[in-house]
């Protein structure tokens, strides 16, 4: 019997070689401790392994945790080292995302997610542009309680979109993508990065962004669920409004009027039947969590009625378990949630100790010195950092890997050169999701929709670049003014 390796030899070897080069060959720079440099070697090897898909990210994280504990780079005491390794498993932000993914399973199980999509199409589906707005609105409604942007855009919205395209005989295998399918596939996808930027709970790397922002600003402020949602509300809604129009101009569908789509959606709703009790409970839980996340009880009755965002997620999950909408077996089978808890804990732990050991300050200081030599003011310099950070995603197939590798140092450098901390933090937070527009491998949703065949590679990349520019301009100018009005900077 041949032993099957648990890793891909080539990317695993590359990651190992890179890690060993940093550990043994590249000299420790002046101003950096040996432990910090060695932890960086482990971290970079981990990122390279994630980019190369050497193993599932959870498995890579377990190995990284073992190496950090064994090498004692965070603590020279063995017991202290393992405590450091496991320190982030109690981080509330990690559990917020994990529990939210478990809750999102209820949207799929009860059929509420699909019902929402068909309801909007039944209302607005008389024209192709209306269908596009219906898909985008469905994304927006689901985003606050669905941290897997892949499940949201690829698992719920995309099948609805494909069904509509097929009903008009717009199929890649027939060469009829241009009828309606190409346009709907692009709008299906490009709603996903925008809604991901609008809520902490809309995509799983967002809590990592929150954590890195807190560290870069020495905890002078921390983005709450409500603060994030309020900040991203206006620029996000404007991007969702503009996106279907921009793509309509770039790739106009041959079919402009779609009266049959309304009948199609109504027939799907008829198949689903009246709203089941499980769907009503799911909807009520959804509403309750939004009320608590938005801080409405505290606003109405005072700070003593505030409920922590992670506690809110636990309350929502508890309701679904008590009512039987989800079973414990459902929770155990939600592999994405447990996987996320593992790899987030590993990444946040490493980011935390890279910061504590002074490496992030050292990197940002060098970046700051380089920008200073260019003679740029804080506005030009921060925009340069923002663009470099955003478009570096052409080289990443994982938003988590990209954020982990670059956000902390870029954010610290921008603040150090004089950018208003809250303004620059919000811009970088938005860019951490908007960068998903760029490529067909930018996030988990992109290969799902791209592989359906409606959009060619050049079309995908062209649309991605144009939308990245539109979205950035909206967030820089409209977002900047909005945040000024809100008093955030």
Image (cartoon, helix red, strand yellow):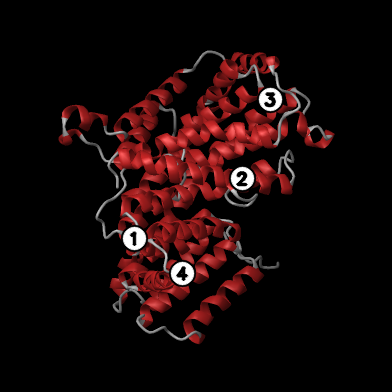
- Quick check: 434 left or right of 455? left
Q: Residues within 10 Å of mark 1 (few under 14, many from 20)?
A: many
Q: Are marks 4 and 3 in contact (CB under 8 Å)?
A: no
Mark 4 to mark 1 CA distance (whole Å): 24 Å
Residue 30's spot in the image, x, y percent? 38, 84
Q: Which callout, 1 or 2, points at the residue further toward the start of the chain?
A: 1
Q: Quick one: label 4 or label 3, which is nearer the N terminus?
A: 4
Circle 4 packing at 10 Å, graded few (<14), some (14-19), many (20+), is many
User: Where is mark 3, residue-wise?
Assistant: 164
**Sequence order check, earlier mark of 3 and 1:** 3
Q: Secondary structure at mark 1?
A: helix
Residue 415: give its label. 1
Residue 344 x/y as whole percent: 42, 56
**Which residue is identified by label 2?**
466
Label count reads 4
Circle 4 or circle 1, nearest the eye: 1
* Label 4 sits on residue: 43
Q: Position of residue 149 (x, y in %)?
A: 52, 42
Measure the C-alpha gap from mark 3 to mark 1: 47 Å
Q: Earlier in the sequence, mark 3 or mark 2?
A: 3
- Describe the element under mark 2 as helix, strand or loop: helix
């Amino acid at each position: 019997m041949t032993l099957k390796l648990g890793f891909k030899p080539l990317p695993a070897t590359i990651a190992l070689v890179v890690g060993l080069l940093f550990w043994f060959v590249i000299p420790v720079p002046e101003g950096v401790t040996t432990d910090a440099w060695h932890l960086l070697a482990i971290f970079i090897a981990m990122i390279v392994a994630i980019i190369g898909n050497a193993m599932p990210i959870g498995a890579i994280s377990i190995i990284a945790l073992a190496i950090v504990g064994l090498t004692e780079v965070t603590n020279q005491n063995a017991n202290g080292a393992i405590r450091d390794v496991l320190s982030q498993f109690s981080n509330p932000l990690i559990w917020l995302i994990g529990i939210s993914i478990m809750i999102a399973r209820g949207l799929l199980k009860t059929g509420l997610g699909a019902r929402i999509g068909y309801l909007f199409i039944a209302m607005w589906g008389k024209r192709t542009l209306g269908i596009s707005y219906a898909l985008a609105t469905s994304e927006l409604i689901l985003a606050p309680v669905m941290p897997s942007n892949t499940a949201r855009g690829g698992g719920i919205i995309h099948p609805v979109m494909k069904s509509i395209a097929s009903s008009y005989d717009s199929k890649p295998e027939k060469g009829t993508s241009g009828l309606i399918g190409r346009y709907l596939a692009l709008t299906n996808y490009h709603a996903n990065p925008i809604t991901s930027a609008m809520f902490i709970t809309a995509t799983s790397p967002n809590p990592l962004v929150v954590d890195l922002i807190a560290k870069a600003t020495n905890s002078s402020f921390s983005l709450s669920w409500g603060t994030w949602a309020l900040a991203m509300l206006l620029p996000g809604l404007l991007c969702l409004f503009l996106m279907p129009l921009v793509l309509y101009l770039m790739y106009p569908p041959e079919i402009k009027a779609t009266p049959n789509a309304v009948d199609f959606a109504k027939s799907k709703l008829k198949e689903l039947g009246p709203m089941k009790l499980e769907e009503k409970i799911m909807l009520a839980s959804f509403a309750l969590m939004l009320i608590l996340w938005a801080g409405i009880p505290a606003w109405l009755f005072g700070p003593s009625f505030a409920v922590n965002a992670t506690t809110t997620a636990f309350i929502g999950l508890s309701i679904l378990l008590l009512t039987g909408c989800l079973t414990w077996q459902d929770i155990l089978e939600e592999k994405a949630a447990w996987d996320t808890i593992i790899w987030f804990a590993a990444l946040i732990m490493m980011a935390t100790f890279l910061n504590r050991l002074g490496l992030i300050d050292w990197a940002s200081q060098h970046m700051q010195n380089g920008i200073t030599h260019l003679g740029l003011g804080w506005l030009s310099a921060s925009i340069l950092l923002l663009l470099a950070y955003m478009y570096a995603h052409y080289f990443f197939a994982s938003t988590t890997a990209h954020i982990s590798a670059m956000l902390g140092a870029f954010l610290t450098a921008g603040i150090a050169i004089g950018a208003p901390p809250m303004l620059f933090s919000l811009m970088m937070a938005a860019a951490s999701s908007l960068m998903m527009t760029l490529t067909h491998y930018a996030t988990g949703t992109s290969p799902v929709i791209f592989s359906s065949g409606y959009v060619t590679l050049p079309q995908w990349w062209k649309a991605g670049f144009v939308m990245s520019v539109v979205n950035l301009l909206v967030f820089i100018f409209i977002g900047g003014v909005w945040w000024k009005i809100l008093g955030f900077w």
